[in-house]
Amino acid sequence: MTTKTKLIRTIYLYIAALASLIFVAAGAGNLINTALKAYVFPKAEKGGYSRCNQQPPVYGLEKGIYSGVTTEEKQTQLDNLLRDYENWQRENTGEECYSAERQNNAVNALTMMIVALPIFLFHWNIIRKEKNEKGE
């Protein structure tokens, strides 16, 4: 192997190890951030998730929508609207909404760490092995 090839290989190994280590650190940081917000500072996330703070969708309440509709049909439509609102409220407010966002953040962070850590370890082992062979 020529000196130039060795230099390029060494630069590649260090850049790949550094980049994957940055991803591991970012994933760990995101995971710690999520845990801190969930257990230490629970109010910190309450204003953050936009889906949790949206008003429910209101539909079917426009003026004149019930013209020519029987009272029984109106009641059925209103019952459906109330049921939809209750479902929306259960799924998009309170702890249920925040726990879904937390789990999503944790999955993203763990995925980043699971992918980046083996890449880092692989490249770092090659670097360490070469350093040991050189006697440095």
Image (tube, helix red, strand yellow):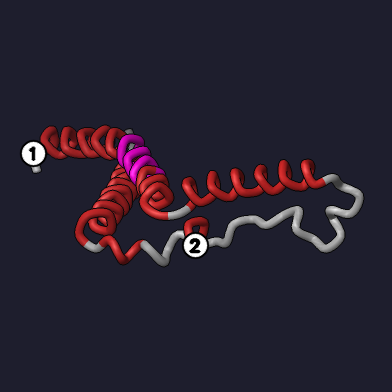
* Residue 11 in sight in this render: no
Considering the numbered disc 2 on the image, is that residue within a helix, a strand or a loop? helix
Q: For numbered disc 1, what is the local secondary structure? A: loop
Q: Which residue is mark 1?
A: 135
> Can I make out residue 55 in this image?
yes
Q: Is residue 84 magenta?
A: no
Neighbour tally class for label 1: few under 14, some 14-19, many 20 plus, Cα within 10 Å: few
| Residue at the image position 72 percent from the left and 41 percent from the top | 76
Which residue is painted at 40% across and 54% down in the image? 94
- Give percent across and percent down for residue 15: 34, 48
- Examine the rendered structure and indicate whether residue 32 appears above or below residue 135: below
Magenta residue check for 114: yes
The kind of residue tagged 1 is Gly
Real-space Cα distance between discs 1 and 2? 60 Å
Confirm or deny contact between disc 1 and disc 2 (CB under 8 A): no
| Residue 125 picture location, percent across and down | 20, 34
> Residue type at mark 2?
Asn
- Could you tell me which quadrant the C terminus lies in? top left
Q: Identify the residue shown where x is 16% and y is 33%.
A: 129
Q: Which residues are magenta?
A: 104-115
